[in-house]
Amino acid sequence: MAEYINGINPDILKWARERSGYAVEAIATFLKKDASIVNDWESGERAPTYIQLEKLADKYKRPIAIFFFPEPPEEPNIAENLALRSSDNTPLEPQIHILLRQAYARQLSLMELNLGTNPSEKKLFRDLQAKSAKSVASLAQQTRIYLDIDVDTQAEWSAAAEALENWRDSIEEAGIFVFKDAFQDDSVDGFCLVHDEFPVIYLNNSRPPVRQIFSLFHELAHLLIGENGITRSGIFSSGAFSSGIIRRTKLTSKEIEDFCDQFAAEFLVPSDDLNTRLNYSIYDDDEIEELANHYKVSRPVILLKLVKKGILTQENYWEKMDQWTEDYKRKRTDRTTSSGGSYYNTRAAYLGYRFMELAFGKYRDGHCSIEQLAEHLNVKVKNLPRLEDCLLRKALR
């Protein structure tokens, strides 16, 4: 007969579930139990077995020991804060809750590895701020100058994947670490967390490179405003935007998202440069795709710019977006399942080579143990040698 565990704090059982974004019914289904049993655990009327507690700990991504604490540990409720600021009331999936905690843990790792000080010579998040810019266009221009990548260089990159890697490198060089993960949630493209020393951006690696590029600069705009942000998948804002928004202290969620969309679109496709390439009075799919390939952006970004210039109407915008959305859904349905790539290459891509180099460097210098290194990189100790091989191969390119 299974033995029930004594000493579990029922308040922490409830806290861990809620912080992971699960409803009682979802956990009951997961454990193949009635919801009343989960409620009884969380009220203290019953206790789970050790095996059930192990399953809960794995589901919530928490150490088992935490359930015996006298009170929940102190940690910011990032998901709740983002939900309050979001213009979309759709609840975040549990995987996003976990990734938000992971992002916070990354910031703590960066603080520990760097003794609390960002080592980058340039710190974009301090040197440029949205509130000091005259307009979205001027902020986008200042950011491009700061990153020192002109439009001609951008156009010379071979494909969107190369563009994404180069943009990521340039932003990390400017003091902002960029991480990736498979979000397991198509409703979110990315998010960012502000910090005095180590702001971070997370991208959904399951999205196409062109979409990741847009999300990267959308989240960068959030950091320049000084607000945590989350990018919901879907249609870009096509509404009018007032440059005065960046001067106000109280911004609505929609205003912030509009601003970030406008910034990303203007940065990636500068209006002045686009004007020199507009040769047609009417743009069909072929011309839109040609411009998208030139700038290494998605077609909706070009569509947004053409609407802003009055070349296409709002009606054209919605027609195109509906058409492309249906095409995308059909292609996803027809697509065969991929077997996936190397675990180590994937982990390296998620972590980023700059963060890996920092962590391995501190280990080699004797500033952290091998167990601490594994914790910083969120991998098992046995996987560290192969992961380091990825880093060395990158350095030899």
Image (cartoon, rainbow, N blue to C red):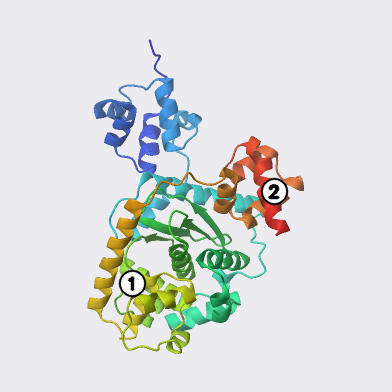
- Indicate whether 96 appears above or below 148: above
Task: Residue at the far right: name it.
Answer: 365
Q: Position of residue 370 (x, y in %)?
A: 69, 39
Q: Earlier in the sequence, mark 2 or mark 1?
A: 1
Q: Position of residue 217 (x, y in %)?
A: 47, 68
Direction from residue 345 to residue 82 in the image, left or right: left
Quadrant, the N terminus: top left
Does the rendering let one see residue 283?
yes
Report helix, strand or loop for mark 1. Answer: helix
> Which residue matches tag 1?
255
> Which residue matches tag 2?
360
Residue at the (44%, 87%) spot, across then down = 277
Picture quadrant where residue 81 is located: bottom left
Residue at the (30%, 56%) spot, across then down = 330
Direction from residue 328 to residue 350 in the image, left or right: right
- Indicate whether 234 appears above or below 128: above
At label 2, the amino acid type is Phe
**What is the crowding at mark 1: few (fewer than 14 residues within 10 Å), some, or many (at least 20)?**
some
Residue at the (56%, 81%) spot, across then down = 152
Q: Position of residue 280 (x, y in %)?
A: 36, 88
Residue at the (45%, 27%) spot, across then down = 54
Between 64 and 99, the one lying in front of the other is 99
**What is the crowding at mark 2: few (fewer than 14 residues within 10 Å), some, or many (at least 20)?**
many
- Indicate whether 80 appears above or below 316: above
Between 13 and 60, the one lying in front of the other is 60
The Cα atoms of the two marked residues, 2 and 1, are separated by: 41 Å
Report helix, strand or loop for mark 2. Answer: helix
Between 223 and 9, the one lying in front of the other is 223
